[in-house]
Image (cartoon, grey):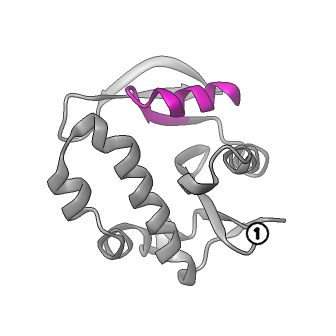
Amino acid sequence: MKIRKAETKDLSRIAEIYVFNNRINYFPIFKDAGFSFGEMQVVSVIDNYFKKEDVLKNIFVFDDGVIKGFVQIDGTEIRKLYVDTCFQSEGIGCELIEFAIREFCVDHLWALEKNTRAISFYNRHGFRQTGQKQFEEGTTEYIVELKR
């Protein structure tokens, strides 16, 4: 199987995928260059988030010789699902979400309301907006809940 539990040695690649996707998808929305290109760096994201034991133990990577994407699961919630932009539209996100549903009975997640591309992807996999919204920390942007 191409999906496996993440290991400490994978953290730089996981963080690289996360940082680059955040710059591509969220900088156009928030337009905060100081955060996107200053605070958000691979090493700091590893040290301040991904290296935490309770986070790392819940990450699974798509690895076919190169780590191309990952999913972070918390109970029945997808916390993060990212595919390297160079490998998007190859079915990797689909495999990761199907893995999460099959192995962990994942039934919900949250997505930034303006991230319509992600919401569309989740809709194609049976997730629907519930109408529940909450403010994204430190902004007036909403995140929306999607349930299966």
Amino acid bearing label 1: Asp
In the image, which residues are magenta?
A: 109-126
Residue lying at the far left in this picture: please name it. Answer: 34
In the picture provided, is 141 more to the left or to the right than 58?
Answer: left
Residue lying at the far right in this picture: please name it. Answer: 1
Q: Is residue 72 visible?
A: no
Quarter of the view holding residue 71: bottom right
Task: Give the SS element for disc 1.
Answer: loop
Number of numbered discs overlaid on the protein picture: 1
Residue lying at the far bottom in this picture: please name it. Answer: 9
In the picture provided, is 94 more to the left or to the right than 121?
Answer: right
Q: Quadrant of the C terminus?
A: top right
Quarter of the view holding residue 50: bottom left
Q: Is residue 57 magenta?
A: no
Q: Residue at x 61, y 44 (%)?
A: 76
Relative height, residue 118 to residue 12 (above, below): above
Q: Residue at x 75, y 44 (%)?
A: 98
Residue 140 drawn at (x, y percent): 20, 28
- Foreground residue among 107 and 36: 36
Residue 139 drawn at (x, y percent): 19, 35
Relative height, residue 54 to residue 131 (above, below): below
Q: How many neighbours does mark 1 have within 10 angstroms: few (below 14), some (14-19), or many (20 or more)?
A: few
Residue 97 drawn at (x, y percent): 69, 45
Q: Residue at x 61, y 32 (%)?
A: 121
Q: Residue at x 15, y 55 (%)?
A: 34
Q: Quadrant of the N terminus?
A: bottom right
- Foreground residue among 135 and 85: 85
In the picture provided, is 99 more to the left or to the right than 43?
Answer: right
Where is mark 1, residue-wise?
Answer: 64
